[in-house]
Each structure stands twice: as C-alpha cells, then as structure tokens.
Image (cartoon, rainbow, N blue to C red):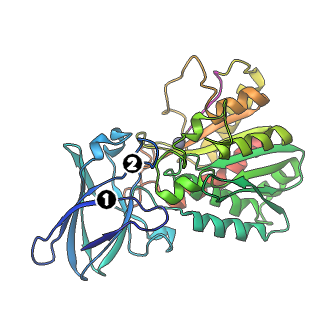
C-alpha cells in the first residue's frame, strides 16, 4: 500500500506500513500539527495498492490531538472517488478509538481510496464555487484582500435589499462542513423559483465569505492560518500581520453595517447541530434575543437535524475575540455561531453517512427560511 497526502487539504504522516501477507497491509499513521500552531485533528489522505486488498489503519497520536473527545463515537469517512468526486461518495467506515489510537479497516475492491476526518472541501473547489456563483446576475464578486500566502479572500454579495446579512465559513479550515453548508445556502439563494430566496433578497443583501482561511485549508490545518493564528479568537484585535483574513472582513462589515451575522463551524465532540447565541454580550437587547429565538424556532421546524436541547453550557461573560460575539457587540445585531457535528446527529441519526455533505447543504438552504423569519 502507498499513502499520499501531498495535495490541497492533505494531512498525514506515515510511521510505517507493515505488510501482513496476502495483501493485508496495515498502516501506522500520525496527524501533522498545524504549521505554526500546536493544533492537530484534521487528516485527509489517499491510499493505493492492489485491487481486492484488505487494509487496516491506525492513527497513533489521536489521543494527543486538540479534541480527543472527538474520536469517541466517531467513524472515519472514505470515498473511492476522492476530493474531486461526488460529495455523496463519502461514506462512513466503522472505526474504533482505544488507548489513544483511532483504527479502522477497509476492503479496497478497486485498489484506491481516500480517507478523511470529514468530506474535504479544497480551496480549488471553493474557487470553482465562487466562479460559478459569480456568473449569476444577482451576484457581485470581489477579492477583499490577499492572505499571508497570497491567496484571494473572496466576498460574494447577493441582492440589493436594505438589510446587510453576513455569512462567513471556515475560519477553522478543518471544519469543511461549513463549506458544504454555504454551498447549499448559495444554491437555494440563487434559485429564481424559490420564493423564500426572492423575498429574502428583497429585504436583505447577503455578503458571503465562503472560505475565511484558504491558507489553512490548503495546508490541511484544523484550526489556524499560515501565521498560526486561530482566526476565531482574533476579532477584537485583528491585525494585517497575524490575522489579515479577519482584518479585511471586519473592515468591510464596518462599512456595510450588519443586521444579521452567521458564522458557520463544526464541533469535534458534540453529535448535534446547534447555534451558539450572543445573549451574554454586554450590550444585548431584548430585540436581539427575540430575533434569535425566532431564527432557531423556524430552523428547528424547517430542518429537524437542527435542535436546541444540546449545545455548549451557557457562559455569564462573552469572549469578544470570537467573531459572533464581537459582531453582536459591535452592531447590536442578531449574531450566531452555527455548529455542525463531525460525527452524526444523535437526535436524527443516519449511521451509513453520519453528518454528510448532503445534510450540510440542506441545513444551509434551511437557514434562509430562518433568516427571513428573523429579519
Ligand atoms: Zn470552529
């Protein structure tokens, strides 16, 4: 068996490949740290060998990763088509976590397969999404600036309505479910036969940054950019040197104003879709709370994968370094972090797929109904 991670979003190191005879190879692996930070959790690699081989894999440093609880009840995703193939080709492979090692087996009928923490979404796929979306007459595309490694930070603005709505995704580059969610949101938003989208675009202009951390996404990071910065801890004191991605977006948000801010993420440990509210910011108003309640109750009815029973425990004080807290305080707007699982929804399980690109996309589309209600 040969293993490679030398592609956009790839991340794995091979400790050893032990030939077991009769094409029963087993690979001992480690996840690389984010380049300039100590985070690690994301992995994505290709394995190739003889058709019909039986492979086994063990990630030996899983227990030392940033979120070791993420491996409990978690199943690896695999595809025989790879990152450029169909999103629906990513299926779950039963996996086990014990003694700090994540392990699984795979029957490689065709002799090659890709394995990842979640269905990957590369900067190249994001560029294709941006180019395709920008063809719509409803859309204005701008490059807000360049990342530390020179990649474009794309902004898509849709519609002409008076209320500015901001949606950003992938501050944490390993949370690829955020990109799938935004892809589903955009597809529905640009559907001229969708009455919710048309009504929303009469009331609002949507500003979308579908990939906030292209350098981290290219390098296969879980959490940081090329400078080692966790962007979602950089909002209060963003700088062009350490967090240019946040700097550019924050400046533009100040120029447009913000009526609604949605920051799309994934959570390693919790098997639920949920929002983190900003009810604990110093300047919260009853109107902000009421609009958030309307958003979540409509989203819960529109997409039952989303739920409100499970989430982070409430905190008395807000960390204004976090994007959604900073935006709530700066603009007095409805502002939320949307969290999706790496595992499955325990309230609505689908074990063969777990949380999947298709479910992410439907959640993104459903968010438009909730936004319309909240505006
Ligand atoms: Zn995140």
Residue 128, compared with residue 283, is above or below; it is below
What residue is shown with label 2? Answer: 33
| Observer able to see residue 257 | no
**Circle 1 residues within 10 Å: few <14, some 14–19, many ≥20:** some
In the picture, the quarter occupied by the C terminus is top right
Instruction: Where is residue 191? Give x, y as percent.
Output: 76, 65
Task: Label 2: state its secondary structure.
Answer: loop
In the picture, the quarter occupied by the N terminus is bottom left
Which residue is found at the position 30% from the left and 69% from the top? 3
Report whether 269 appears left or right of 244.
left
The single residue placed furthest to the front in the displayed view is 241
Q: Main secondary structure of the magenta part?
A: loop
Q: Which portion, as a residue range, is magenta?
A: 275-280
> Mark 1 to mark 2: distance in Å?
10 Å
| Observer able to see residue 180 | yes
Report whether 49 appears left or right of 238.
left
Ligand 1 contact, mark 1 (Cβ < 8 Å) = no
Instruction: Where is residue 19? Give x, y as percent.
Output: 13, 71
Going from the N terminus, do you reach mark 1 or mark 2 first?
1
Ligand 1 contact, mark 2 (Cβ < 8 Å) = no
What residue is shown with label 1? Answer: 13
Task: Label 1: state its secondary structure.
Answer: strand
Which residue is found at the position 27% from the left and 55% from the top? 95
Report whether 31 appears left or right of 101.
right
Q: Quadrant of residue 373?
A: top right
Asked if residue 74 is among those painted magenta in the image, a careful observer would answer no
User: Mark 1 near mark 2, Cβ–Cβ under 8 Å?
Assistant: no
Instruction: Where is residue 7? Give x, y as percent.
Output: 46, 68
Which residue is found at the position 83% from the left and 57% from the top? 198
């Amino acid at each position: 068996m040969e293993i490679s991670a030398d592609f956009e979003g790839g991340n794995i190191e091979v400790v050893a490949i032990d030939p077991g005879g009769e094409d029963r190879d087993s690979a001992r692996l480690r996840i690389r740290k984010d380049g300039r930070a100590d985070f690690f959790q994301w992995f994505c690699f290709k394995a190739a060998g003889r058709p019909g081989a039986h492979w086994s894999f063990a990630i030996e440093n899983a227990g030392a990763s940033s979120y070791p609880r993420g491996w409990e009840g978690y199943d690896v995703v695999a595809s025989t088509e790879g990152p450029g193939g169909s999103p629906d080709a990513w299926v779950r492979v039963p996996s086990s976590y014990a003694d700090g090692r994540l392990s699984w087996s795979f029957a490689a009928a065709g002799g090659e397969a890709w394995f990842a923490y979640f269905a990957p979404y590369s900067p190249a796929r994001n560029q294709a999404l941006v180019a395709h979306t920008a063809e719509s007459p409803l859309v204005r595309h701008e490059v807000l600036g360049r990342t530390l490694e020179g990649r474009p930070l794309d902004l898509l603005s849709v519609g002409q309505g008076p209320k500015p709505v901001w949606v950003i995704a992938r501050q944490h580059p390993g949370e690829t479910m955020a990109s799938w969610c935004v892809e589903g949101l955009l597809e529905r938003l640009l559907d001229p036969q969708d009455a919710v989208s048309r009504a929303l675009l009469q009331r609002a202009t949507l500003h979308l940054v579908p990939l906030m951390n292209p350098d981290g996404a290219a390098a296969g990071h879980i959490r940081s950019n090329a400078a080692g910065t966790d962007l979602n801890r950089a909002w209060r004191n963003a700088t062009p040197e350490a967090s240019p991605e946040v700097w550019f977006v924050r400046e533009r948000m100040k120029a447009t104003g913000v009526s609604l801010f949605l920051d799309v993420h994934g959570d390693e440990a919790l098997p639920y879709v949920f929002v983190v509210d900003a009810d604990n910011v110093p300047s919260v108003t009853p109107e902000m709370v009421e609009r958030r309640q309307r958003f979540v109750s409509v989203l819960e009815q529109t997409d039952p994968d989303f739920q409100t029973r499970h989430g982070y425990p409430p905190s008395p004080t807000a960390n204004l370094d976090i994007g959604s807290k900073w935006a709530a305080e700066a603009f007095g707007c409805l502002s939320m972090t949307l969290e999706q699982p790496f595992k499955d929804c325990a309230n609505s399980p689908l074990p063969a797929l777990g949380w999947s690109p298709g479910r992410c996309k439907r959640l993104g589309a459903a968010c438009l109904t909730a936004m319309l209600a909240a505006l």
